[in-house]
Image (cartoon, rainbow, N blue to C red):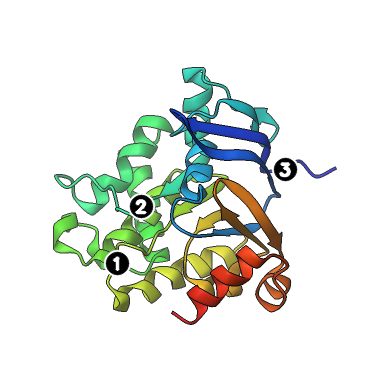
Amino acid sequence: MNEAAIEMIAVNKWFGDFQALKDIDLTVTPGERVVICGPSGSGKSTVVRCINKLEAHQSGTIRLYGAELTNDPKSIASIQGEVGMVFQQFNLFPHLSVLDNLTLGPMRARGLTRAEAEARAHDYLERVRIPDQANKMPKQLSGGQQQRVAIARSLCMEPKVLLFDEPTSALDPEMIAEVLDVIVELAEDGMTMVVVTHEMGFARKVADQMVFMDRGEIVERGTPEAFFGNPQTERCQKFLAQILHH
C-alpha cells in the first residue's frame, strides 16, 4: 500500500457560524498533481491552508505521509518544513535581496551553512529561469519574476509537497505564462503538488486529478479528460461553461 502524501478525511472547518469546508475527503499520492477549481468562496484556498496548518480544521483528520496534523506547535513546525506554499501575493521579504530571501529558511530551519544555502539558491533560481536576478531586491523585479522567486524559495526547503494558492491571479496577463511554465516543469519532474487555479488550459496540461469545489464541498472529481469532456454535475457544467468561454 503506497502511503498517501496527503490524506484529508471528513475535514470540517468553520469561520464563526460559516462552514467553509464540509466533510472534505481528498487523497494525494506521492508524485500526483491535483488541481482544485471552483467559484470564489468555494473553499479551495481553505483546503490548501488547512494542509499547511495556516488554518486549523475543527474536525476530521489530515495526514501528511502518514503523520497526523495536530495543533501542537511542534507538529505544525515539522509540517511546514515538508510542505512548500506559494501564495497569490508573493510574500517575499521586501528588505532582503532575492538571494537572502532564498537562503534564510534553509539556514534557519535546515541548518545549512551560508555557502550551502547560496549554492542551493543559485540552483533553484536557475530552475525557475532567473539565475541573473540573485542580487536584486524584490521591488526591482516584475510580478512574474517575484512569483518565480517565491517558487524558488519554496523549493530551497526541498519540500515533499508544493501547494499553490492561485499563484497567477495577482499577475498581469503577459506574466502568467512564465510562471505556469515553471510549474509545468516541476510537475513533469514528478513534484507532488496541489494547485488552486482558474487557469484551465494549465490544469488540463498538468493535472492527474481535477477537483471541483462549490460551497465548501467537493462536488466532482476526475481525470482532466473526464472532467472537461464530460462533467457529471450541473454545478460543474455551469462553472466550466462560464470559465471556458470567459
> In the rendered image, which quarter is residue 34 located in?
bottom right
Relative placement, left or right, of 118 versus 188 is left
Q: Residues within 10 Å of mark 3 (few under 14, many from 20)?
A: some
Please report the residue visible at 35 percent of the width from the left and 35 percent of the height from the top: 107
Q: Is residue 165 above or below residue 77?
A: below
First in residue order: circle 3 vs circle 1: 3
Please report the residue visible at 80 percent of the width from the left and 45 percent of the height from the top: 2
First in residue order: circle 2 vs circle 1: 2
First in residue order: circle 3 vs circle 2: 3
Q: Position of residue 160 (x, y in %)?
A: 57, 45
Which quadrant: the N terminus?
A: top right
Which residue, given by chain and number where applicable, does mark 3 sit on?
4
Depth-wise, is mark 2 or mark 1 nearer the camera? 1
Q: Is residue 174 above or below residue 89?
A: below
Which residue, given by chain and number where applicable, does mark 1 sit on?
171
Depth-wise, is mark 3 or mark 1 nearer the camera? 1
Looking at the image, the residue that sits furthest to the bottom is 245
For the residue labelled by badge 2, is the local secondary structure a helix, a strand or a loop?
helix
Q: Which mark is residue 184?
A: none
Q: Amino acid at mark 3?
A: Ala
Q: Amino acid at mark 1?
A: Leu
Which residue, given by chain and number where applicable, does mark 2 sit on?
121
Q: Is residue 192 visible?
A: no
